[in-house]
Structure formats: structure tokens, C-alpha cells
Amino acid sequence: MGNWRTCFLILAGEVSDCFVKLWRWTFAHETWLWYRS
């Protein structure tokens, strides 16, 4: 019973971490474009 819950938490953690990295990269990219113009 606890296995799937742990697996879900790890998966959710990795997905959210991926989203954070993607958001940071996008934000940095937008800032760089704004800074260059």
C-alpha cells in the first residue's frame, strides 16, 4: 500500500522539479531577450 504512494511522491517531485527548471530557463531566456533589445 505504501509503495505506490512513495512512487507517486517521487514522480510528483521530479515532475515539479522539471517544471521549475523549465520555468527558470524560460524566465532567464525572456529576461535575456529583453536585456538585449
Image: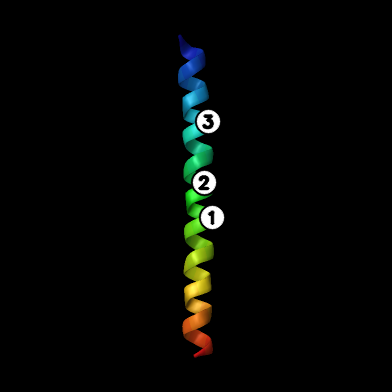
Residue 19 vertical position relative to residue 30 in the rendered view, above or below: above
Spatial separation of the CA atoms under disc 2 and disc 3: 10 Å
Spatial separation of the CA atoms under disc 1 and disc 2: 6 Å
- In x, y percent, where is residue 10? 53, 30
- In x, y percent, where is residue 4? 48, 17
Label of residue 10 in the image: 3
**Amino acid type, label 2:** Asp
- In x, y percent, where is residue 29? 53, 72
Check if mark 2's residue and mark 3's residue have beta carbons within 8 Å: no
Label 3 element class: helix
Whichever of labels 3 and 1 marks the residue nearer the N terminus, that label is 3
**Amino acid type, label 3:** Ile
Residue at figure coordinates x 53%, y 79% from the top left: 32
Q: In the rendered image, which residue does mark 1 sit on?
A: 21
Residue 18 vertical position relative to residue 28 in the rendered view, above or below: above
- In x, y percent, where is residue 25? 54, 63
**Amino acid type, label 1:** Lys
Q: In the rendered image, which residue does mark 2 sit on?
A: 17
Indicate the quadrant containing the N terminus: top left, top right, bottom left or bottom right.
Answer: top left
Check if mark 1's residue and mark 2's residue have beta carbons within 8 Å: yes
Q: How many marks?
A: 3
Residue at figure coordinates x 54%, y 39% from the top left: 14
Label 2 element class: helix
Spatial separation of the CA atoms under disc 3 and disc 1: 17 Å
Residue 20 vertical position relative to residue 5 in the rendered view, above or below: below
